[in-house]
Amino acid sequence: MKPLAAKRPNRPAPSAPAKLELVRPTLTAQEEPFPKIARELPPLFLHHYEHLSDKDFPLSPDWDRYYTLALTGNLRITTARFGPTLVGYIFNLVQRHLHYAEPHALLEMFWLEPSHRGGVFALRWFRANDDMLRGIGVRKVMASIKPGYRDGRVELIFQRLGYRNSEKIYSKVL
């Protein structure tokens, strides 16, 4: 007796192998609470400090004060991440102004690792920061930058975002 041949099911012809998509990290902007990112900040703070033109004082962050400001809602941070890696921050001090009832924000400091600068990310990032501040009721944002920093490119970013030069700040170490 002859064995029965197994019937082959009707299957479509095999197609070309699926292309594997390489997932590349991208720069993202998001608000993150200080306690969540605190352990990632020291190397960025140091890199930021090393790039300052005037180092009037040694770097000595008051970590306790950062935590206090975060707990009271007065410190709001928009971060830049390349995949899971923190590569930048915008620190905002938010409070009611003494002369006006509406909340104001001081864009206290910002940093983006040099290898991630260029392109339009900085504009998108600062817009995300403005949107976050607007969402919590901030009516005015003030930012101070070092004169001529990065050949004035930072000033161009602020101008493109609609910021205007409304005050000059002079400083003196006593």
Image: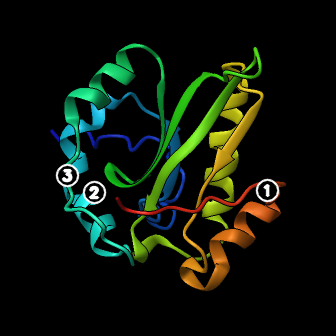
Tell whether label 2 touches label 3 (CB within 8 Å).
yes
Q: Secondary structure at mark 3?
A: helix
- Distance (Cα) linking label 1 and label 3: 29 Å
Q: CA distance from mark 3 to mark 2?
A: 5 Å
* Numbered circle sitting on residue 141: none
Please give the residue where the numbered disc 1 appears in the rendered image: 161
**Which label number is shown at residue 45?**
2
**Residue that appears at 75% across and 14% down:** 101
Residue 39 is situated, as x and y percent measured from the top left of the image, at 18, 40
Q: Is residue 145 left or right of residue 75?
A: right
**Image location (x, y in percent) of residue 31:** 50, 34
Few, some or many C-alpha atoms within 10 Å of disc 3 (few <14, some 14-19, many ≥20)? few
Q: Residue at x 46, y 71 (%)?
A: 116
Q: Is residue 92 above or below residue 110?
A: above
Q: In this view of the protein, can residue 160 be seen by the observer?
A: yes
Residue underneath mark 3: 42
Q: Position of residue 130 (x, y in %)?
A: 69, 40
Residue at image position (77%, 28%) is 139
To which quarter of the image does residue 123 belong? bottom right
What's the amino acid at mark 1?
Answer: Leu
**Among all residues in the image, which is located at the extreme front?**
174
N-terminal of the two: label 1 or label 2?
2
